[in-house]
Structure formats: structure tokens, C-alpha cells
Image (spheres, rainbow, N blue to C red):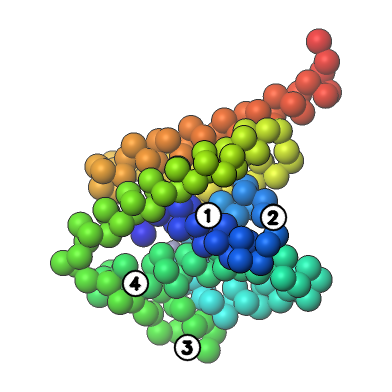
Amino acid sequence: MFAVGHLALGYLAGKASAKFLDININIPAVLTLSIIPDIDLLIPILQHGGPTHSIILCLVIALPALLVWKKRTTPYLVTLVSHPILGDYPIRSSNVPGIQLFFPLTSNWFSAGTEVARLAYVYLELALFSVFLTLIFTTRDIAGLLTHHPSNMLLSIPISTGLLPVFLQFPIPVPVELIAPHLILIFLLALAIFIDLKHILRLHYPF
Ligand SMILES: [Zn+2]
């Protein structure tokens, strides 16, 4: 799955679990966690899809937060594991490396996707992105996202990890149908960062 699909899926998974538990979530944190396993793309010693995609390591990392914040951690954990379980495992086909879903219990690579269904996955990501866009406006999450908050700075992670690198390669590695959604997300997230930066500058340099 590409960055657009992961962000949309993570947001929807986080929102659904937060609604079920009747708690509020921090949208920049959710968007960041939805793509954080792909940080391995920026670390040369790690193979993409490796240990950062292990649900066991996700649970181990989340354990201290679960002990401290209990159920308030759940939507963030659901978002984090949505990346390997729903975003990568069902979609990666056998002709590309899968993901090390159960590292360190096993170093095997798992995948369940097929090359034949590649086009269907593109439309699935488009559908997820459409639902994401509709929900952030109807739930007014967009208003919160575009209000200054220190957590907005977290959004530099999804931009640098998954969204911007797409346009730094030639040929562009995403299907043409997903280029506009990538650009829309870069614009929205960069705007949220800009709003927070502007607020910080105003605080320190009032004029
Ligand atoms: Zn991934």
C-alpha cells in the first residue's frame, strides 16, 4: 500500500476505535503512527517491510503506554498495527518481499496479495482516501488540524517518510491515479505545519 492508503486507513482505524471507546484522539499523532513502520525506507541498514512491520514489536513498544494510559492508547495501537496487518500484508504480492509480521519470533516474510489484483488495490486506496477526505471535513477534524498545536510538527514524519519521497524518484513509483491524493495530503499536512510555525514565530518575534 502507498502512503495515501496507509494514512487514510490509519485515520479510519483510529477514528473507529476511538468512537467505540468514546475517547478523543490526536489527529497528527494518528496520521504519523499510520505511516511510521515505513521509516525503514529512510534507514539504509533496514530492509523495507522488515522488523518495523512486526506486530510483536508494535505491541512491545506500545506496552509502557498501555500500562500508563490504558484504553486511551488503544486507538493509537490500532492505527499502528493497521499498517502491517491491513495495509501491507493483504496487498503485497508474492513477487515482492512481504513483511516480517512476527519478527523476532520468526524472520519469515509474509504476504497475501496477488499481482492480478494490483489495479483493485489502487482503487481501494482511492476509495479509502475519499472516505478519509469526507470524514476529516464532516467531523471537523480538519479545523483541529489547521489550528496551531505542537503536535502538528509530527506531520513532518508522514511528509518525509511516505509522501514527498514519491516525487523525488523517477519514474514516480505510484500509479498515476494516486498522484493527486499524494499532492493533496502533502498540501494539507504542510499547511498544518506552516500554521504552527507561524504561531511559534509570532510568539518569539511579535511585530
Ligand atoms: Zn509498510
Whole-number angstrom distance, CA of label 1 to CA of label 3:
29 Å
Sequence order check, earlier mark of 4 and 2: 2
User: Three-letter amino acid code at disc 3?
Assistant: Thr
Q: Secondary structure at mark 1?
A: helix
Sequence order check, earlier mark of 2 and 3: 2
- Judging by the rendered image, the residue that carries numbered circle 1 is 11
> Which mark is drawn over residue 34?
none
Q: Position of residue 46 (x, y in %)?
A: 49, 66
Q: Label 1: how many residues lie within 10 Å, few (<14), some (14-19) or many (20+)?
A: many
Name above or below for residue 136 compared with residue 112: above
Q: Secondary structure at mark 4?
A: loop
User: Which quarter of the figure has residue 167?
Assistant: top left
80 lies left or right of 182: right
Q: Label 3: how many residues lie within 10 Å, few (<14), some (14-19) or many (20+)?
A: few
Name above or below for residue 121 compared with residue 173: below
Whole-number angstrom distance, CA of label 4 to CA of label 1:
18 Å
Q: Label 2: how many residues lie within 10 Å, few (<14), some (14-19) or many (20+)?
A: few
Whole-number angstrom distance, CA of label 2 to CA of label 3:
36 Å
Do callouts 1 and 3 mark residues in contact (Cβ within 8 Å)? no
Q: Position of residue 194 (x, y in %)?
A: 62, 29
Q: Position of residue 145 (x, y in %)?
A: 62, 39
Q: Position of residue 172 (x, y in %)?
A: 29, 43
Residue 168 visible in the current orientation: no
